[in-house]
Image (tube, grey):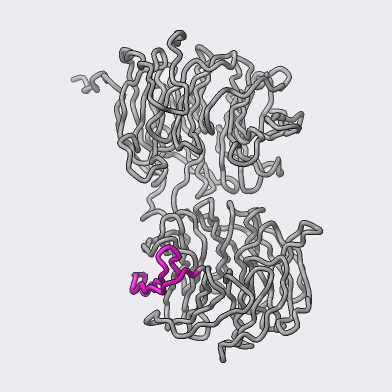
Amino acid sequence: TLAPTDAPLTAPTIKEKFFLRDLPGAGRHPIDLASVGDKIYALNTETQNVAVIQNDRAIKYIAVGKQPAALAADAAQKRVYVSNAGDKSISLIADDQLALTQSIGEEARALIFFENRLWAGLANSATIITLDPTTLQIQNRIAIPGAFSIISLAGDAQNHRVYANIFDKTAVIDSTTLRVGSTINTKGSYSTLLAQPATDSVLVAIYDSASATQFLVAYNPSTGAERARVKLGGDPRGAIMNRDGSRIYVANSFTNDVSVIDARNFTSLATISIGLKPNAVALDENARRLYVANYESDSISAINSDTNEIVATIPLAMLVTAFETNDAAQRTYIANASTDSVFVMEGARVVKEISVGRHPIDLARDATSNRVFVAHQADGTLAIIDENNFSVSTTKIITRPLTTVAVDAPRARLFANDIVLDLKTLAPIGKLILRGQTVQSNLAPDFVRVNAAANRVYALGSNGVPGSNGRRVIYSVDGNNLQQRAPLSFNGNIHFIAFDPETNRVYGAGTHPLALTNEFSAWDLNDAKIFSLALAARTTGLAYNPQTHHLFLAHAASFGSTPNPNDNTIQILDTTTFGEITRLNVQAPGLIARIGNTIYVAGRDDGSITRIQDANIAAPPAPSPTFTLTPFQLLTPARTPTR
């Protein structure tokens, strides 16, 4: 008996949905950390929740108030506190449950638990309030003279002091009398603040404008005299000292690393590369672990505090950043920044997860050598995956920031932002320089794709215009000499492009930042725009299927506050007429990839992959020109696109 077969599809159809990782929720943009027992608590600003982490995995997410800004913990009582800046409240979490939320009537962005009190620094007044840790009722108010906002707080239990960072100054408060003892000048200070009880010092990160360098500086809290300083990375944020006072750890948000400092002689011991925009740290001294919150990677880096090596990357949410395909092997590679890994998918099954560098952001494949290149945004290196055995090697730093990688196999070269590398040796052989619209504005692209058959390079980058007229545009570049031809005409910021290998057309989609509208356009090989269409929703992914001439556009939630019926859809156009075939409902769709007639859509919220089966169907009629008011040119009736 013959096995039953699926009936031929009469339209593109959603076939299934599966997940790269099984997480109990999602935490986006972690901004603060706290350690309680064998658990780490991560405060996530975008998703407005606290992730509970145990054994290097998120086990629970606890919803809190609006715009949560800071976290504090009473480790002895196993309590966690959250300041909710958006609704001017404080939340208490006990036994991993939200126990109480109390309005304080003011916005607090700094929070510590110290000497059996909860201390909150107010954002819009120079005031610190103390609260009862059980009832969250305000007990005391401490006014800081000559200040207008409290940025950060730190406590010194040995000397009974609380320090408050107040922009270029640090206030010293007696924690027994609740009186301000002094205010010392810490010019260039902003966020980083620590107490060093052993030397009776307050440690503040400052920016030295003369040398354009960040330092951690130890000050005498009584006189303001500088005692020592040590160099840090860029834009230091959260900091912590270990229990015996021998080590200091500082998260550097701009350079994507952690400074490890010998606290006794103020020397640098190590710099640890981690995820994107780290801004908070916590220690579990029993487990010998340092935890770092990576704000833009939606992850926590777990570091062995004895060896300074990363031992785990803990995803708070999935963050798919790139697709690449091997059609011959029916294989799809998926870069996920929050796990620092590349997933290998064959059909609808994940067959391998490959650990790579920090925050993988883009992928490119060289079919001639069976290598996949992975660009790491956080540390500026490339990983090279051997497709035969999935082994990984890593280059030295190529450039920072590194946001894209593209292969040009016929000319044996590799593009890594503006750096051109020899495809075989990976040695630098040139640069790809873009010219903006202002005088002498030489620019580096942030996204590159190569149409090898047409010997054309397309690079996305700034138009070189500062301020509100700045745009992200497509530059067309001659592949022979890497000379720029012209930016392709587009009314806004271009975000996604795809090629038609038959006609050498370029398809692109993006947004207009001022009108909050969306556009799809097509250009020919002469860089002329041949079609433009106003889109009803924001495009978050784009892919073209040359077998059916179908273009797939993912639309996530639009900018408006009112839900749009076109949100959370996959819009499918036929490029022979640019008529719409259908729309499929996919929740929070993101990047799109294609193998044959199979389309893969990454979920932006949950790390899911939705598989769509495409089908050859009759082309719909072309859209009619419209004269609805719009910032975009829609159709030029005299030039109907043809194949």
Depth check: give the residue in front, 67 or 26.
Answer: 67
* Residue 293 drawn above or below residue 145: above
Residue 419, image x, y percentages: 71, 33
Q: Specify whether residue 484 is in view.
A: yes
Residue 471 sits in which quadrant? Answer: top right
Residue 10, image x, y percentages: 26, 19
Q: Residue shown at 70%/82% (left/top)?
A: 221
Residue 587 sits in which quadrant? Answer: top left
Q: Residue shown at 40%/70% (left/top)?
A: 89
- The answer to if 105 sits in the magenta stretch is yes
* Residue 311 drawn above or below residue 150: above
Whether residue 565 sits left or right of residue 168 in the image: it is: left
Dominant secondary structure of the residues highlighted in magenta in the image: strand
Q: Quadrant of the N terminus?
A: top left
* Residue 207 drawn above or below residue 185: above
Q: Quadrant of the C terminus?
A: top left
Question: Start and end of the magenta stretch?
Answer: 83-108
Q: Residue shown at 76%/67% (left/top)?
A: 230
